[in-house]
Image (cartoon, rainbow, N blue to C red):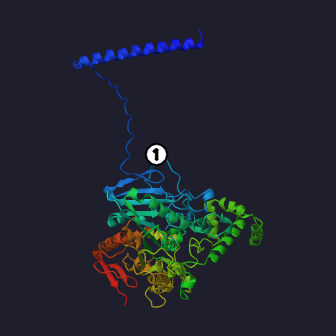
Amino acid sequence: MNTAETTEVRGARLQNAARTAAQAVAVTACIALSACGGGSGGGFSFTPTAPAAPPPPPADGPMVRTTTAGKIEGVDDSARTGTWFWKGVPFAQPPVGALRWRAPVEPEAWSGIRPATQFGNSCLQIGRLFSPGTNNTFDATVGTNLGKPVGSEDCLFVNIWRPATEEKNLPVLLFVHGGSNISGYTADPLYDGAALAKAANAVVITTSYRLGILGFINMPQLRPGGTAGDDSGNFALLDIMAALRFIRGNAASFGGDAANVTLSGESAGATNLLAVMTSPMAKGLFHKAFEMSGGISLASNLPPGTLPTLAPASASLAQGQAILERLLVADGTVADAAAAKTYIATRTPAQIADYMRAQEGGALLTKVVAAGLGSVAPIPDGTVLPVDPIGAIAADQYNKVPMLAGNTRDEGKLFASLLGTIGFPKPGWIVTDAQRFSMMFSFDPDAPSALTVADIIDASYLPVDTPGTGYNAATDVITQGLFGASRDNLLNTMRTRQSNIWHYRLDWAQEAPPWNDVYGAAHAFDLPFVFGNFSGSLLSNVMGGRANQPGRLALSSVVMASVGAFLRKGDPNTPELGVTWGTWPSQLLLDATPTAARITPVNAP
């Protein structure tokens, strides 16, 4: 039999099989219809049963949100705080290895649902009073870790709180913590955003950013010649801008309005905020600003005898060179600074960059701080940050948005240890940071205490209210020379370009003795009033107590209402103030009696 015959035979067999199958189907259908009482009218029709649909995927839980990198699941904290939160959400890839000293890179996408229930790592730092404990928490290990590396370089995360409602298009606040740009962490209970989110009816977000020389370094060998951001050395500022871009792309997933974002910060966080405000790279990323105790002035902007916040890029360039030389000597690569200079001259930029990136992070910071080279600040590089930021504001070349600004009456009291460096004969305190931490950590404002001002403040500054030489007068030199001068320079310059500027001064100083004299209304003591947090932090240990509680909480309630008004409409005036808050140079003094808030407007002449 040939091939053609085989095909014909096979075709016939298939046709017969098909006819047989069709007949069987028809018979079965007739039987089925008859059994059901159908088919009596003659013909019938038959529709095969459709295959069962696959089961739907499991529904996401109510706390799941979709971000541009993937899904995250937060916590319903409505029973305790009236809020929902998502913590430890990455806004950039870990800046480690080849990404150390590079502009932040968007996070890699993930599949599935990423838990967002705990704070991410704090950024690597050398432990100080306001650094994290061993487990990224505020606890007794903060005191035992002073001077030691804590945290991780894998640290670029945001934390998000919002009211436990379905309301959408809420205003968004991004807060940048302080710590002299060398310490601090978002898990500090001081910065918990729940109370403010609930009171202000807003989405409150806190962000981390790289600290110390990991965040700011001016070393030509680390410049890849790529993007302007990579070459600037202002990696901390770029981190903050990356967090703002995260908000722009993801705010709606949390009920926030990406077109109504307020950038806020305190101390170094405020200085960084102001730097971002003058950066052309930040155009359109935020719409209001709320700075607390910041400054962005060079010495050339200020009167003689005052203290600048920033230094020219030439100063950080010299610092970068000194850091490199000290490291080479410290690890035995060369014998001394002269040999280090020769060695550096014989190496390519890529070799030096590889050498720097090979340094273990904790050891690197330890060596730099031990050499006295650890202080950092935004670098006026001329690209990310103008060479004269105040001059840029004067020239109307900045991100002009409504401004809420604040200071405390006794800013300088938190820095009394520095008195011996600014013309006074001695430091203001006779205790070490470890001793001061222990005193504050164990303090109970409601229990009798044998602690006195003489246990903390040097006798040469007592009594504290001695005119000219007392503790109050001495620390006021820091208050006016650093914070007052920078405030006036900034706001008076801004005032030439915009009128929507409001300024407050916190005067509240009702801590239990001796802290009412040691700190009073010191630097950072406005933070608990803004965030509504008076428990679980180092500041709250000395601020709290039953005696001042009614007035303290009343003042905080008014402050949060005013902040909420500013977030919504760019003006902090609200009925809760009970007064009209005029624009700068008018001010609002924030204080309280033991039982009630006391708000005093000081109107400009």
Circle 1 is placed at which residue position? 112
Depth check: 249 or 118 in front? 249
Residue 277 lies, in percent from the top left, at: 49, 73
Q: Is residue 512 left or right of residue 138?
A: left
Q: Quadrant of residue 365?
A: bottom right
The residue sitting at the top extreme is 1
SS for callout 1: loop
Q: Is residue 126 left or right of residue 54?
A: right
Residue at (36, 60) in percent of width and height: 162
Residue 173 lies, in percent from the top left, at: 41, 66
Q: How many marks?
A: 1
Evaluate whether residue 184 shows in this view: yes
Residue at (63, 57) in percent of width and height: 98
Depth check: 453 or 160 in front? 160
Q: Is residue 125 left or right of residue 517?
A: right
Q: Quadrant of residue 236?
A: bottom right
Residue 598 lies, in percent from the top left, at: 31, 79
Depth check: 567 or 123 in front? 567
Q: Is residue 455 above or below residue 228?
A: below
Q: Quadrant of the C terminus?
A: bottom left
Q: Quadrant of residue 25?
A: top left
Q: Quadrant of the N terminus?
A: top right
Amino acid type shown at disc 1:
Gly
Evaluate whether residue 127 shows in this view: no
Q: Is residue 409 above or below residue 336?
A: below
Residue 366 lies, in percent from the top left, at: 62, 65
Disc 1 crowd, CA 10 A, few/some/many (<14, 14-19, 20+): few
